[in-house]
Image (cartoon, coloured by chain):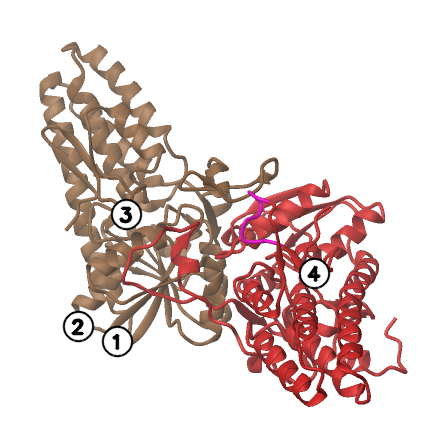
Chain colours: A brown, B red
Amino acid sequence: MFKTVEWKQSGVVMIDQRLLPEKEVYRTYRDHRGVARAIRDMVVRGAPAIGVAAAMGVALGARKIKSKDIASFKKEFGSITRLLASTRPTAVNLFWAISRMSRIVEDNAGKTATELKKKLIAEAIDIYREDIEMNRLMGKYGSDLLKSGSTVLTHCNAGALATAGYGTALGVIRGAVEAGKEIKVFADETRPFLQGARLTAWELKKDNIDVTLITDNMAGHMMQKGLIHAVIVGADRIAANGDVANKIGTYTVALLAREHGIPFYVAAPTSTIDMNILHGDDIPIEERDSREVTHLKGRRIAPQGINVKNPAFDVTPSRLVTAIITEKGIVKRPYGKNLKGLFDKKRKVR
Amino acid sequence: MFKTVEWKQSGVVMIDQRLLPEKEVYRTYRDHRGVARAIRDMVVRGAPAIGVAAAMGVALGARKIKSKDIASFKKEFGSITRLLASTRPTAVNLFWAISRMSRIVEDNAGKTATELKKKLIAEAIDIYREDIEMNRLMGKYGSDLLKSGSTVLTHCNAGALATAGYGTALGVIRGAVEAGKEIKVFADETRPFLQGARLTAWELKKDNIDVTLITDNMAGHMMQKGLIHAVIVGADRIAANGDVANKIGTYTVALLAREHGIPFYVAAPTSTIDMNILHGDDIPIEERDSREVTHLKGRRIAPQGINVKNPAFDVTPSRLVTAIITEKGIVKRPYGKNLKGLFDKKRKVR
């Protein structure tokens, strides 16, 4: 089985997702600058995987700091975290992971630089391990929502490739399959980056899960024909009111699901929930290079000299979301109250 | 300016739409078999253009019949029309054009083979000329529906390239621009064949109409942001109840338009209306080769060994259609009654 991102003594190793499914190439990044570039260029993508990679990038950067003086260590550490935080604006897991790493430095005032470096590496590896564990929990909780014999539509890739392993949306599908249910998957190809065609289809095929590829604009027709029974997607950031920022096109899928009476589920760890953002409209939406739309594998597919838009995400209002599957349990309406409850340590959601 | 399809003494000349926008290549077809192949392989596409090409294909085929005996002429003529009718199942203009050509043979019982050949060529050229004329009328009627300063979303290509010239949906946009209105266009790229990216963007750019390319899954986001004020698409077949078969993804765009209170217009000549089909569910939907989804410009973009669906069209229920723009005027609800009225020669719609 492949590994999306991994900490090794030599550096952070990532599978280059731009080259899948044709080539399975692993790249080793030896400093935080390389990791930042890999995140920006989408060698690694998917909110949880970005978080893990960024944490490892911070650890790599910290490991290379030469100064033993804590003040200068902190200064260099600050520039490392700022660089990594500048890579992509929408996935909140990036900022969540970086702030967890920063807290290690803040909370260990008396420690030496060498001790801090060790703790930072350990924290990055913890973030990695916890991510897999959270995905397995989501898979366990979420699988109850899927009936055996059903066909599930997913958009983009919220699988093992979008996380440290197992996946969020695809983790729920894997959980249902592991529970002995018969599940088929329809994968939207997900233009412009083709995460569905290239990544979701690839990893489900590897797991022998029945997958049917469609172009994004076919989902409505498949629902009209009664071929889809549930939708599951991941998330890049969930606002405190339950609005979900996810890969461009998710909003349209959610609207189609409501029109056809099909449940629309979002699977995301609590690290994706941003309680500081009250409403989805306030989530920053990344606009990426127009070449992602006008070119494919380096070849032009549109005329020159036209305007192009390329927002990487959209916002699905919480009213279209049937439930949010987290590692702490399944959250339903009212989202404002119930999402807040997840962060109240005394309460158990499930 | 380019010509989509043209009758010349040497044969039927068509611009090869598979190669646009990179290359502007014109191909000459000297017999009906070549024209049939060109329709099937989408050298020419778009319901009205398919109709014109088929009519010219019939004329080409008839011109080559050697027998002077009317019985054998008719037999050969029958096999020509059957071949052309087998090329694509959804666009009704194909069958409409072929049956107009067949009527020439049926209605001219006393004529010689030579006379019939002349009449068939004249009829094909008439169908071509009438198509352009109908588009100009649709442009005139439809332009009243568009306000100056508005941005119009279109899906697929219902332009000069989809017709003998001027276009249906893009004809309405051209009509509005010619009437002095300021109109901007958003073009869905329209996977898998990319008619929006390759053809709509190309022909609007040639006309200096402001065009912005988006992937299909971005339309919902653009509507959420208030950037789209109207939607206009063409049609491949309209049922008697007003249900519209058009390029895959049209249904989703119509649903998005309704959700955002945006008018959704269909521009199509009356030759696209099939009064023999009562309900959209009964319109045959072509399923095309899966390679159109898994490959782009000959290069694979999805893993091997997965399932793929590739329906070329979907059906938009008439309840989502604000108005149908025809060469006889604008048709609104109730479509059952008002579409029937178009074919009642004594009544004037407008």
Which residue is under mark 4?
B163
Residue B190 position (above or below residue B91)? above
The residues bearing labels 4 and 2 have C-alpha atoms spaced at a distance of 53 Å
Q: Residue at x 19, y 21 (%)?
A: A62
Q: Nearer the viewer, mark 4 or mark 2?
A: 4
Q: Residue at x 17, y 45 (%)?
A: A3
The residues bearing labels 3 and 2 have C-alpha atoms spaced at a distance of 31 Å
The main secondary structure of the magenta stretch is loop
Which residue is under mark 1?
A148
- Label 1 packing within 10 angstroms: few (<14), some (14-19), many (20+): some
Of residues B294 and A243, the one drawn nearer to the viewer in this rendering: B294
Of residues B9 and B219, the one drawn nearer to the viewer in this rendering: B9
Q: What chain does badge 1 belong to?
A: A
The residues bearing labels 1 and 4 have C-alpha atoms spaced at a distance of 48 Å
* Kind of residue sitting beneath label 1: Ser
Which residue is under mark 3?
A22
**Residue B340 image point, x, y percent:** 77, 82
Of callouts 3 and 2, which one flags the residue occurring earlier in the amino acid sequence?
3
Residue A232 position (above or below residue A20)? below
Q: What chain does badge 3 belong to?
A: A
Which residue is under mark 2?
A180
